[in-house]
Amino acid sequence: MTHKIAPSLLSADFGNLQAAIEMVNQSEADWLHLDIMDGVFVPNISFGFPVLKYVKEISTKPLDVHLMITDPIKFIKEIKGIGAYMMNVHYETCVHLHRTVEQIRENGMKAGVTLNPHTPVSLLEDIVSDVDMVLIMSVNPGFGGQKFIEHSTEKISVLKEMILRKNANTLIEVDGGINLDTGKKVLTAGADILVAGNAIFSTPDPMQMIAKLKTL
Ligand SMILES: O=C(CO)[C@H](O)[C@H](O)COP(=O)(O)O
């Protein structure tokens, strides 16, 4: 399988979201990544359901929604309502992770579990086969434009080994500080999907950067 690219809208010009979404539509990107923050689980607030609804109306790409919020189980219906393809919840926010994953899938979405940089992959032993994707955060969540945490590549290798050992189909997504250099490293370690914000939206030619990331 060739890897997928998911541009993160967090780094786009919020004054012209339509242009950013249309650029992604026309690009070789596979998914559009959307970061929802609550100012509690992470020290920032991004955007909420009215914006997500607008994004869905314009985007032709599957929506990969990353919930950096406490109690994400409360919002499964709303995330389904905006037509999300993938709903990612944080391991650190779910007391009943298995129940949350089941409910996401029962609502017709793919289920992703996200790990903060300090959370070990070994904690996923009893859930990895039941989720569609694991999202490895390679920065502390909350802000775009941060430096890639090098230890993340080791985590990806350990996770890949676990997935293969269990004969599971779980995908590995990586988010935070991804550019042409770090993207190559994480793909070599076993990643399937690269999320990139700054590397795409802060270059003069974002579409060309998506194409370059796609051919890594
Ligand atoms: O989840 C996120 C922040 O919490 C973003 O998706 C991530 O930071 C992408 O931005 P960049 O590629 O600039 O690091």
Image (cartoon, rainbow, N blue to C red):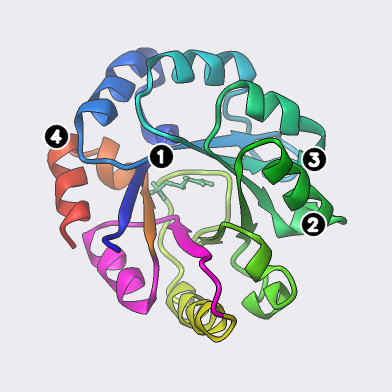
Earlier in the chain: of badge 2 and badge 1, it is 1
The quarter of the displayed image where residue 42 is located: top right
Circle 3 SS class: helix
Distance from disc 4 to disc 1, alpha carbons, whole Å, reads 16 Å
Q: Please tell me whether residue 198 belongs to the stretch shown in magenta.
A: no
Residue 27, given in percent of the width and then of the height, sits at: 20, 34
Residue located 30% across and 66% down the image: 182
Badge 4: few (under 14), some or many (20 or more) residues near its Cα, within 10 Å? few
Q: Which residue is mark 1?
A: 8
Q: Are marks 3 and 4 in contact (CB under 8 Å)?
A: no
Badge 1: few (under 14), some or many (20 or more) residues near its Cα, within 10 Å? many
Residue 35, given in percent of the width and then of the height, sits at: 54, 37
- Which amino acid type corresponds to the residue marked 3 in the rendered image? Ile
- Magenta span covers which residues? 167-191
Q: Is residue 38 left or right of residue 29?
A: right
From the viewer's perspective, is the residue at label 3 or at label 4 nearer?
A: 3
From the viewer's perspective, is the residue at label 4 or at label 1 nearer?
A: 1
Q: Is residue 62 left or right of residue 168?
A: left
Q: Which residue is mark 3?
A: 73
Q: Are marks 2 and 1 in contact (CB under 8 Å)?
A: no
Q: Please tell me whether residue 187 belongs to the stretch shown in magenta.
A: yes
- Which amino acid type corresponds to the residue marked 4 in the rendered image? Pro
Earlier in the chain: of badge 3 and badge 2, it is 3
Residue located 36% across and 70% down the image: 186
Residue 160 or 139: which is nearer the viewer?
160
- Which amino acid type corresponds to the residue marked 1 in the rendered image? Ser
Quarter of the picture holding the N terminus: bottom left
Vertical arrangement, residue 157 with respect to residue 9, above or below:
below
Q: Which residue is mark 4?
A: 204
Q: Which residue is mark 2?
A: 97
Distance from disc 2 to disc 4, alpha carbons, whole Å, reads 41 Å
From the viewer's perspective, is the residue at label 2 or at label 1 nearer?
A: 2
